[in-house]
Amino acid sequence: MPQIKVQDSNTAQQTARQHLDAHFVTEKLEDVVYSKVWYITGSDRDVYEVEGEATIKTKDFDRATARFKRRELRFTLLIDPVTGNLIKLTV
């Protein structure tokens, strides 16, 4: 993933979506809703914290039929504002 400098909450949301897509490669993210995006200053480093909910669609193969399951997921991501790298993902 290319390094992106995160300068505002919109860029933090875009970066969070890219990290979620990379983390859930085999499943499809349908709805992603962000509840909080804020900038936190710290003594070691500053981070963007992004919280939200997502709906994940997975295939469930049951004998000859293919069904889809959906599950709800709450997430929190910590993103480095300088490089755009994921520091921590909590699901």
Image (cartoon, rainbow, N blue to C red):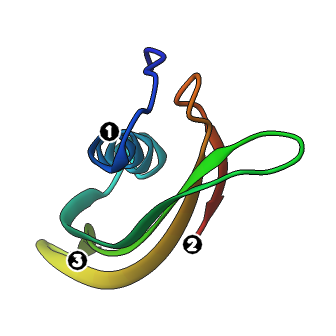
Q: Disc 2 or disc 3, which is closer to the eye?
A: 2
The amino acid type, in three-letter code, at marker 3 is Arg
Of helix, strand and loop, which one carries label 2?
loop
Residue occupying image coordinates x 27% and y 68%: 58
Q: Which mark is residue 91?
A: 2
Q: How far is the residue under mark 1 from the one under mark 3?
A: 43 Å
Q: How far is the residue under mark 1 from the one under mark 2?
A: 21 Å
> Foreground residue, 86 or 60?
86
Q: Is residue 16 left or right of residue 63?
A: right
Q: Which mark is residue 63?
A: 3
Q: Is residue 58 left or right of residue 46?
A: left
Quadrant of the image occupied by residue 65: bottom left
Of helix, strand and loop, which one carries label 1?
helix
Placement of the N terminus among the 4 image quadrants: top left
Residue occupying image coordinates x 57% and y 22%: 83
> Foreground residue, 69 or 61?
69
Residue occupying image coordinates x 31% and y 57%: 27
Residue occupying image coordinates x 27% and y 46%: 10
